[in-house]
Each structure stands twice: as C-alpha cells, then as structure tokens.
Amino acid sequence: MTHPTNTLIAVLSVTNRAYDLQYQSNLTETSWVDILTNVPGSGGPLALSDTNQHGHAFYRVRISLP
C-alpha cells in the first residue's frame, strides 16, 4: 500500500487577495495549523500544496486582504 506524500488543494483565486492553506487532524480542536500563508491570488486557478504527511487531515483555505 502506498501513501500519498503530497496533497493538492485547487481553488479559483481573486487578485488583490491572499490565501492561506491550513490543516487540522481533529475537527474537535479549535486551532488550525498554517501550511502556506499569504499566497497571492492570480485571478485564476491557484494550486496550494501540502508536502507533509499528516495522515488523515482536514483542510481549509482562508482568504484575506493582503
């Protein structure tokens, strides 16, 4: 059995926005762990990649003004 070493999250982005990829291993926890921060939006598809092995993980993308 092989285990993936890379998780790719793709979102449509907007210019003048910053994107953060975060993960959590248990949804009963209240804090999220940053994987990528302040990735600028391009106005098109944006690929956010997690190259760490977290086992089972939940991901979210936060969008903010730069």
Image (cartoon, rainbow, N blue to C red):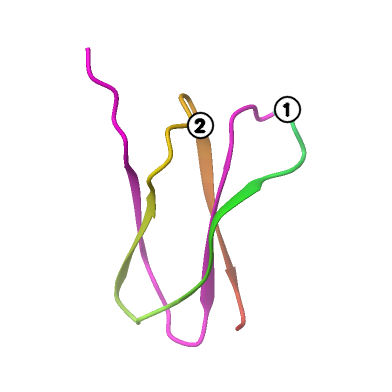
The amino acid beneath tag 2 is Ala
Residue denoted by label 2: 57
Q: CA distance from mark 2 to mark 1?
A: 12 Å
46 and 12: which one is in front? 46
Instruction: Specify whether residue 61 is painted magenta.
Output: no
x 48%, y 31%: residue: 54
25 and 64: which one is in front? 25
The amino acid beneath tag 1 is Thr
Looking at the image, residue 51 sits to the left or right of residue 22; the answer is: left
Farthest residue, direction right = 30
x 51%, y 31%: residue: 57
Disc 2 or 1, which lies upstream in sequence? 1
Question: Residue 64: x and y, percent?
Answer: 61, 74
Res. 48 image quadrant:
bottom left
Residue denoted by label 1: 28
Question: Residue 60: x and y, percent?
Answer: 54, 49
Question: Residue 66: x and y, percent?
Answer: 60, 83
In this view, the mark in front (2 or 1): 2
Q: Is residue 1 above or below residue 54?
A: above
Residue range highlighted in magenta = 1-27
x 39%, y 73%: residue: 13
Question: Residue 50: x and y, percent?
Answer: 41, 47
Looking at the image, residue 53 sits to the left or right of residue 36; the answer is: left
